[in-house]
Image (spheres, rainbow, N blue to C red):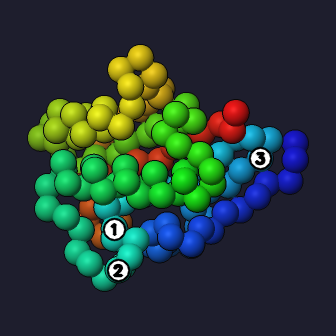
Amino acid sequence: MADPIFHLLAGAPAPVAPYSHAVETDGWVLVTGQLATDPDDDDTPLPDGVEAQTAKTMDNLGRVLSGLGLGFEHVLQARVFITHFERDYAAMNAVYASYFPDNRRPARTCIGVTGLARGALVEIDFVAKRP
């Protein structure tokens, strides 16, 4: 196994804890879970509602992928964490699905949790692979 590369990317959201935006080895890219924070102003409150937070979270993941020269088409697996599973699952899915073609969606796990950093409603992480 090649030595891992720890990526901290300009233009990606400021980390809310001590972590790298992504870690890469042998073409595999593990993208840290993102929240709906504003990458241009970390003091901006999170958007209201799971739809807005899911869209912003996916956009933030897109920034990380883009900073690595990758896109959503390189994502093979996703994990979604939501704090109000029954209430927000369908709405989150509708937004999430819009980022991937129907015939090329990553493997995914969705987990209901009791809380997320900054009071977020949703957090999503990815595993991607370089072509």
Pointer 3 and pointer 1: residues touching (CB < 8 Å)?
Answer: no
Q: Position of residue 114 (x, y in %)?
A: 27, 53
Where residue 6 sits, quadrant-wise, is bottom right
In the picture, the disc for residue 37 is 1
> Does label 3 or label 2 sit earlier along the sequence?
3
The residue sitting at the right extreme is 2
Q: Which one is nearer the viewer's eye here, 77 or 66? A: 66
**Label located before the other in sequence (3 or 1):** 3
Badge 2 is on which residue?
Answer: 41
- CB under 8 Å between discs 2 and 1: no
Quarter of the image with the N terminus in it? top right
- Residue named by callout 3: 25
Q: Secondary structure at mark 1?
A: loop
Left or right: 36 in relation to 12:
left
Q: Quadrant of the C terminus?
A: top right
Find the distance from the CA under tag 2 to the CA under tag 1. 8 Å
Left or right: 58, with 46 as reference point: right
How far is disc 3 from disc 2 in space, using C-alphas?
Answer: 31 Å
Residue 107, percent across and down? 48, 26
For discs 2 and 1, the disc positioned in front in the rendered view: 2
Residue 14 coordinates in the image, percent (x, y) = 47, 74
Q: Amino acid at mark 2?
A: Asp
Circle 3 SS class: strand
- Tell me the crowding category of disc 3: few under 14, some 14 to 19, or many 20 or more residues within 10 angstroms, Cα based: some
